[in-house]
Amino acid sequence: MESDNIECISVSEAMVVDDEEVAHVPHPFLKPHGDGSGTVAGGGRSPVMSPATRVHELLECPVCTNSMYPPIHQCHNGHTLCSACKSRVHNRCPTCRQELGDIRCLALEKVAESLELPCRYFSLGCPEIFPYYSKLQHEAWCNFRPYNCPYAGSECSVVGDIPFLVAHLRDDHKVDMHIGSTFNHRYVKSNPREVENATWMLTVFHCYGQYFCLHFEAFQLGVAPVYMTFLRFMGDETEARHYSYSLEVGSSGRKLIWEGTPRSIRDSHRKVRDSHDGLIIQRNMALFFSGGDRKELKLRVTGRIWKEQQNSDPAVHIPNPCSS
């Protein structure tokens, strides 16, 4: 939204940190620094290679470098590759260029059955060890797997843990960062008749030791333009359920209020938006809230985030009134 005027202000308990303070005080938005010693972003040091790991390297396809699963193919000289790549190399061994044929490497498949290997995300904290053929299924849903970048304005392919992504959003996408559990979001658009899909903005909030992404956007819902704002939690769904948030927009004695649980960034921005899981404002209502001659959109969205406190009764949740 290059032509729009957007302000996002963190109020109430919010802190304002200037450059001099950053130099002396640890700050939640400082980018983590690597030391070039084999440490994964946000994770630990790579372990010493075990014999099982060396065998695991034999199970790496030389073409796609992914782990091979049955059927594992081999050429007459014993070079192996996965079944998905067999057609890609036009039935020619990528190592010796001999014709592959339909030879299965049954010995390597049997060796794989005997292996137990750590999850590929062990450096990010996963302690689990799995039989080789169960490992892939676990890794698809591992809670320690990297997160996709939550920036929705481009097809960003960056993945990483939460501290890494927070620094990436700030430094590479120039996303506004705020500290506090309350927000005051002002959206101004000079020509509200022109609405483009995914016209949006993103702000990251830090409170309760966690990070949250506040999205605000305008898009076409069928033939009608709408404005939508929603919150995503930078963490897994089970953690997201510990928090709630409210959004409010209004003017002239009228207001719309939304309360809900933030969605995890495991759910894509588009998935959350298309499920309408947030505060949706129809254009006519938005123009009414803007006042004046309704030729300019002026929306102010306020809200807060709070942490739920568990009662002894698991079905009852008590909001935590304390600020971050």
Image (cartoon, rainbow, N blue to C red):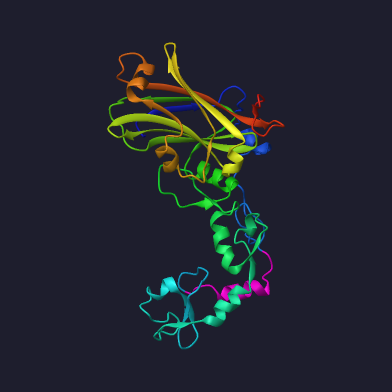
Location of residue 270 with respect to 256 vertically, above or below: below
For the magenta stretch, what is the residue range? 47-62
Quadrant where the C terminus lies? top right
- Residue 29 in sight: no
Q: State the image coordinates of residue 8 (x, y, percent, origin top left).
A: 49, 28
Say if the magenta span includes residue 48: yes
Q: Residue furthest right?
A: 312
Question: Which of these two is toward me, 181 or 110?
Answer: 110
Q: Residue at x 58, y 45 (%)?
A: 236
Q: Quadrant of residue 245?
A: top right
Residue 221 is left or right of residue 233, and the answer is left
Residue 228 is left or right of residue 38, and the answer is left
Quadrant where the N terminus lies? top left
Question: Which of these two is toward me, 33 or 140?
Answer: 140
Q: Residue at x 49, y 52 (%)?
A: 158
Say if the magenta span includes residue 17: no
Q: State the image coordinates of residue 83 (x, y, percent, origin top left).
A: 44, 73
Location of residue 116 with respect to 178 vertically, above or below: below
Q: State the image coordinates of residue 248 (x, y, percent, origin top left).
A: 48, 22
Q: Residue at x 56, y 79 (%)?
A: 108
Q: Quadrant of residue 251?
A: top left
Q: Residue at x 53, y 26 (%)?
A: 246
- Residue 265 in sight: yes
Q: State the image coordinates of residue 300 (x, y, percent, origin top left).
A: 45, 22
Q: Residue furthest top?
A: 253
